[in-house]
Amino acid sequence: IASRGSCQVVQLKVIFLGTSSSVPTRKRGLSAIAVKRGSEVILFDAGECVQRAMICAGLGLNRPMKIFITHLHGDHCVGLLGLLQSMSMMKRDKPLSIYGPKGIIGFVKYNIRALAFDLTFDLQIKNVKEGLVVEEAEYSVYACRAEHSRLTYAYLLEEKPRPGVFYPEAARRLGIPEGRLWSILQRGETITYQGRVITPDQVTGPKRRGRKIGYSGDTRPSKKLIEFFKGCDLLIFDSTYADRHSDKAEENLHSTAREAALIAKEANVKTLVLTHFSARYDDTSELVKEASEVHSNTIAAEDLMEIEVKYPE
């Protein structure tokens, strides 16, 4: 976390830990995406051996962390078990929360008992429903039902608006001394000075929107997801198949790269990242080409690739 001008700046980075579908390949692990916001890690899905990928990415296993599981297919959730065990073996002491569809509580608790390991930290597991899942002071996480063969949720991480640009001259005109009171107003909080109530809007510009990251999990495209992902700065979307295998996308309830791009275009997404590639595509250039014909700002995820999400101008 740093300071830029009159506002607090929190680095927001997406790290792709696993980008293959169903089975791993030599180059790709199974589904897992880490969003590093400041010192916190927000993990979406946990394919097998996710803890190794996290260590390779320099994330460590004892950070403040939340985990969101899209659905209970093995390539998206089996890695939870090894991750929890590794955390305990490394003496994690920070609490951890896991969110997922109905069945997630039994899945985790039964396997902890079956594998007979003790946790060294407090663990909360919660079922997800559509709408608001988590609300923190600076961001919220929402869920939306996706279309797949099991109960599946897409997720949206949305930062809350930041205070507007601070105008020092406006503060001086009001006689407010520079220092602590300025800092409070810059944070968007009201102060009382010499019997007068001073509100942030008297010394700052309009509030500025935060950043938005969307993650689809496995899904067919839908109008519902277009609305859910409206205005995302970064959208990470199921792109299991190329056009020539669109019949398989329909049969297996996945999306093609072109369909992912259509979602991104209709939702006015800034950057689209294709992921969850079928192992049949050793080279993803075909999928990027097809998606880019619809949404020009499209890239293919690679394991351990990092993308920093900047604040909107």
Image (spheres, rainbow, N blue to C red):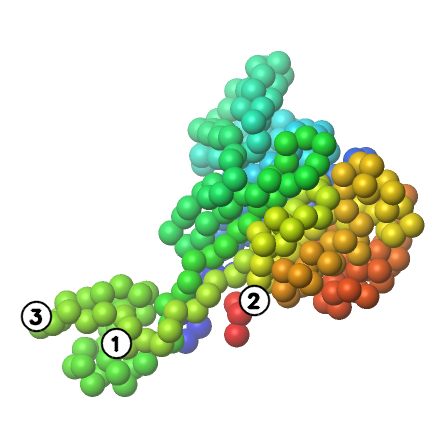
Residue 311 x/y as whole percent: 52, 67
Whole-angstrom CA distance, mark 2 to mark 1, is 27 Å
Identify the residue under disc 3: 195
Q: Nearer the viewer, mark 3 or mark 1?
A: 1
Whole-angstrom CA distance, mark 3 to mark 2, is 40 Å
Residue 65 x/y as whole percent: 51, 42
Give the class, few, some or many, for how many residues have Cα within 10 Å of label 2's Cα (few <14, many ≥20).
some
Name the element at disc 3.
loop
Q: Is residue 302 visible?
A: no
Q: Is residue 93 above or below residue 16?
A: above
Name the element at disc 1.
helix
What quarter of the picture does the N terminus occupy? bottom left
Which label's residue is closer to the chain start, 2 or 1? 1
Name the element at disc 2.
loop
Which label's residue is closer to the chain start, 3 or 2? 3
Whole-angstrom CA distance, mark 3 to mark 1, is 16 Å
Front residue of this view, candidates 163 and 79: 163
Label at residue 202 = 1
Q: Nearer the viewer, mark 2 or mark 1?
A: 1
Query: Where, by quadrant of the figure, is residue 160 drawn?
Result: bottom left
Q: Judge left or right: residue 166 versus residue 307.
A: left
Q: Is residue 153 above or below residue 120?
A: below
